[in-house]
Image (spheres, rainbow, N blue to C red):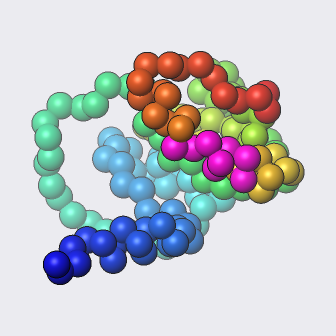
Amino acid sequence: MDNDPGDEAVANVKTATAARLHHNAYVTQDQEATRAFYEDLIGLPLVATWCETDELFGPAMPDTPFSHIALKVDAAEQDAVAERLAAAGYEEPVTFVLEHGYCRSLYVKDPNGLLLELTADHPDAEAINATRQTTAREDLARWLAGDHTSNNTYR
């Protein structure tokens, strides 16, 4: 019996980890406002501009806080960004903080309404992740079966 060519890919996924966010693409009405927000306020340098035109899928997707990118930062950088945002006039509900327990997240909507999360891990993140990993599959199966009881004991 021949091995399935997908077996090697699955094995590689189990050992591979992402090094960084490669890119995120959003269509916006004001690209300069987007550039200024991410570069001048958040501190992410513009490294390339790709000019392409495509129209996909028709209507806009509904607004939801569960559609966002999250970038890992340390606590000092998170505080520095929060200060720059406040100085630029950003305030609730356009920006807000959630203490998840295992991390602290600064959320902010950019000038086009796109949600960005800047996440600073808890100092014990490695131990917390190791604990959660021991039951990750069981937790997912329980959630998918309809039991949505929180397992976040770190808040």
* Residue 20, x across and y down, in percent: 55, 67
Res. 112 in view: yes
* Magenta run includes residue 110: no
Q: Which residue occupies the extreme front position in the image?
A: 1
In which image quadrant can residue 74 be found?
bottom right
Residue 21, placed above or below residue 29: below
Q: Nearer the viewer, residue 71 or 11?
A: 11
Lateral position of residue 78 relative to residue 111, left or right: right
Magenta-drawn segment:
130-137
Query: In the visual, does 145 lie left or right of 153?
Result: left
Say which residue appears at 51% left-offset and 63% top-offset. Answer: 21
Residue at the bottom extreme of this rendering: 2
Q: Could you say where residue 147 lies in the image, as x and y percent from the top left?
A: 50, 19
Residue name at image x 86 percent, y 51 percent = 123
Q: Can you see residue 87? A: no
Q: Residue at x 77, y 29 (%)?
A: 153
Q: Nearer the viewer, residue 118 or 52?
A: 118
The residue that appears at 41% across and 24% down in the rendered structure is: 145
- Majority secondary structure of magenta residues: helix
Q: Compared to 139, does 44 lie above or below?
A: below
Q: Is 12 in front, or is 28? A: 12
Q: Quadrant of the N terminus?
A: bottom left
| Front-most of residues 124 and 137 | 137
Q: Position of residue 23 (x, y in %)?
A: 44, 62
Residue 58 placed where, x, y %?
13, 36
